[in-house]
Amino acid sequence: MDEKVVSLLKASFAADLYETVNAAKKTTDEKNFRHTMFESSSHMVFCALFPKADLLEIPDLTDEFKASLKTFNIIGVITDATQSLELFMLGGMNKPLTTLKSAEGLSGILSEGQVMAFLDRYFETRGFEIDLETVGVDELIRRSSEETLQNTTFSRLHEIDEMIKMTGMDN
């Protein structure tokens, strides 16, 4: 797997997910948060921020999954809402995730292997055929750009362009 691809996807994922962590900072009475990445009539893909105690109430978790839990966790979820439920332990901390100060800090607690496995299934669920094991960063950016142009409004494209300029990746 191309390390540049891993780095780009992990950083992008962390930046996107950090918005949910920031939203959680403003809410004191809720302890579970969901960051929806994709929703169709047949599937939903989201990340959830869950305390360990709540996760342990889910039936049929493997001992390995339970052992990987921290006090506060980021779980990747892919479901068809009827039969299928896939859980990915993306990362966790023993202090609240809201103590993270940046997307880079969030990226630092993410499990690279689990994030890549989750994103691979996410792309598959979306019908975005790309092999993360063999794709290079240039091909990933080209394919992602095509997908974005096909499925994003012009106003959202402008927002994305502004974000890219802020990161300095437009050079």
Image: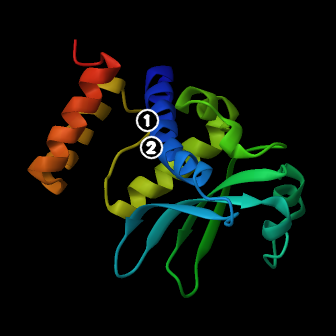
User: Where in the figure is residue 4, as x and y percent of width and height?
Assistant: 45, 21
Relative to 42, say whether 27 is above or below. above
Relative height, residue 152 to residue 94 (above, below): below
- Left or right, residue 165 beside residue 25: left
Image location (x, y in percent) of residue 76: 60, 57
**Which residue sits at x=49%, y=56%?**
121
Q: Residue furthest bottom?
A: 82
Q: Going by the picture, which residue comes out furthest to the top?
A: 171
**In this picture, residue 60 sits left or right of residue 9:** right
Q: Which mark is residue 100?
A: none
Asked whether the residues under the numbered discs 2 and 1 touch, taking CB atoms below 8 Å apart as contact, a structural biologist would say yes
Mark 1: which amino acid? Ser
Of 48 and 132, the residue lying toward us: 48
Q: Which residue is mark 2?
A: 16
Q: Quadrant of residue 36?
A: bottom left
Mark 2 belongs to which amino acid? Asp
Residue at mark 2 to residue at mark 1: CA–CA distance: 6 Å
In this view of the protein, can residue 146 be seen by the observer? no
Q: Is residue 60 left or right of residue 138?
A: right
Give the left or right position of residue 85, taking residue 150 as reference. Answer: right
Asked if residue 117 is positioned above or below residue 171 in the image, the reply reads: below
Which residue is at a point 42% across and 33% down the rendered structure image?
134
Asked if 12 appears above or below 16 in the picture, the reply is: above
Circle 2 — which element? helix
Q: Residue 12: give its label.
A: 1
Structural crowding at the residue carrying mark 2, measured as other residues with C-alpha within 10 Å and reported as few (<14), some (14–19) or many (≥20): some
State whether residue 11 appears in this view.
yes
Residue drawn at 84 percent across, 43 percent down: 94
- The percent position of residue 74, horizontal first and vertical second, equals 66, 52
- Residue at screen point 49% across, 31% down: 11
The crowd level at tag 1 (other Cα within 10 Å; few <14, some 14-19, many 20+) is some
In the rendered image, which quarter contains the C terminus? Answer: top left
